[in-house]
Image: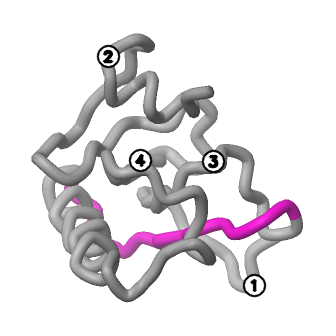
Amino acid sequence: MKTIFQKIIGREIPAKFVHEDELCIAIHDVTPQAPIHVLIIPKQLIPRIGNASASDQALLGHLLLTASNVAKQLGIAESGYRLVINQGRDGGESVPHLHVHLLGQRSLAWPPG
């Protein structure tokens, strides 16, 4: 069964794209937790960060660099932003497809809720 992200990547479900390249997509989250809330999603299915292996190292780096570039594109690089990867139920994971949350355009408290 496909994840919602695989369906978005396959254009079976619409989404508001911010970026796409050969390795990943970046889309606006449908339930944003900040004024800017973008998901950076690899096209390759890795269920969660705990399932990533050494062979995924370049892809994982690409996701972080893409997040940085999207932050610049959206004008939040200078003011600051947060990157989040959820792992497991207690970590807030809701879709079994690794993705990076890019949150910004408001002050983000620490520690997170």
Q: Which residue is mark 2?
A: 11
Vertical comparison of 16 with 81: above or below: above
Callout 1 amino acid: Pro
Residue depicted at x 12% and y 47%: 22
Relative to 3, is 86 on the left or the right? Answer: right
Is residue 34 a member of the stretch shown in magenta? Answer: no
Mark closer to the chain start, 3 or 1: 3
Q: Judge from the rendering whether residue 31 lies leftward or rightward of residue 98; answer left or right.
A: right
Instruction: State left or right for residue 112 relative to residue 75.
Output: right
For marks 1 and 4, the one nearer the N-term is 4
Range of residues picked out in magenta: 75-89
Q: Earlier in the sequence, mark 3 or mark 4?
A: 3
**Magenta-span inclusion, residue 88:** yes
Which SS class for mark 2? Answer: loop
Whole-angstrom CA distance, mark 3 to mark 4, is 10 Å
Q: CA distance from mark 4 to mark 2?
A: 18 Å
Question: 64 and 42: which one is in front?
Answer: 42
Label 1 and label 4: CA atoms lie apart by 21 Å
Q: x and y percent of residue 27 in the render?
A: 36, 37
Q: CA distance from mark 3 to mark 1?
A: 15 Å
Q: Residues within 10 Å of mark 1 (few under 14, many from 20)?
A: few
The amino acid marked with disc number 4 is Val
Please name the amino acid that badge 2 sits on: Arg
Identify which amino acid the numbered label 3 is placed on. Answer: Gln
Label 3, on which residue?
A: 33
**Dot 4 corresponds to which residue?**
38
Q: Which quadrant holds residue 14?
A: top left
- Answer with left or right where residue 72 lies relative to residue 101: left
Q: Is residue 103 visible?
A: no
Among the two numbered marks 4 and 2 on one chain, the one whose residue lies closer to the N terminus: 2
Name the front one of labels 4 and 2.
2
* Element marked by disc 4: strand
